[in-house]
Image (cartoon, rainbow, N blue to C red):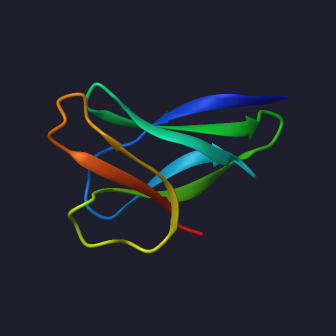
């Protein structure tokens, strides 16, 4: 079954690994409070695989990868972007 799942990410330097079903498609990156979240269209019948994501300040050194989006925190103190290692 295809549905949208939300995955919590961390504000950390470098890559982080998140287990996501095979062939998931990132559809939105945003903040809930000050916590970065990634929403992805997933097929719940497929097994999960580790995927590497980077959440970085837009003023930081850019890590190469496919962009999942850009957002700001609710306090508007931090603007972040999310990248998927392809």
- x, y (%) of residue 15? 38, 62
Q: Is residue 6 above or below residue 54?
A: above
Q: Observer-nearest residue: 22 or 72?
A: 72
Q: Is residue 59 left or right of residue 64?
A: left
Residue 78: image quadrant is: top left
Q: Is residue 14 left or right of residue 22?
A: left
Q: Quadrant of the C terminus?
A: bottom right
Residue at 50 percent of width and 70 percent of height = 65
Q: Is residue 40 above or below residue 64?
A: above
Residue 4: image quadrant is: top right
Q: Is residue 21 above or below residue 67?
A: above
- x, y (%) of residue 72? 29, 40
- x, y (%) of residue 75? 17, 30
Q: Is residue 24 left or right of residue 50?
A: right
Residue at 70 percent of width and 47 percent of height = 24
Q: Is residue 47 left or right of residue 64?
A: right
Q: Is residue 58 above or below residue 64?
A: above
- x, y (%) of residue 43? 79, 37
Residue at 37 percent of width and 54 percent of height = 81
Q: How many marks?
A: 0
Q: Quadrant of the N terminus?
A: top right
Q: Residue furthest top?
A: 33
């Amino acid at each position: 079954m295809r549905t949208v799942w939300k995955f919590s990410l961390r504000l950390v330097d470098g890559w982080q690994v998140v287990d996501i079903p095979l062939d998931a498609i990132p559809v939105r990156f945003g903040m809930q409070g000050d916590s970065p979240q990634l929403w992805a269209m997933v097929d719940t019948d497929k097994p999960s695989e580790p995927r590497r994501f980077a959440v970085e300040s837009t003023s930081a050194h850019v890590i190469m990868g496919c962009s999942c989006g850009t957002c700001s925190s609710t306090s508007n103190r931090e603007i972040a972007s999310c990248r998927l290692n392809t």
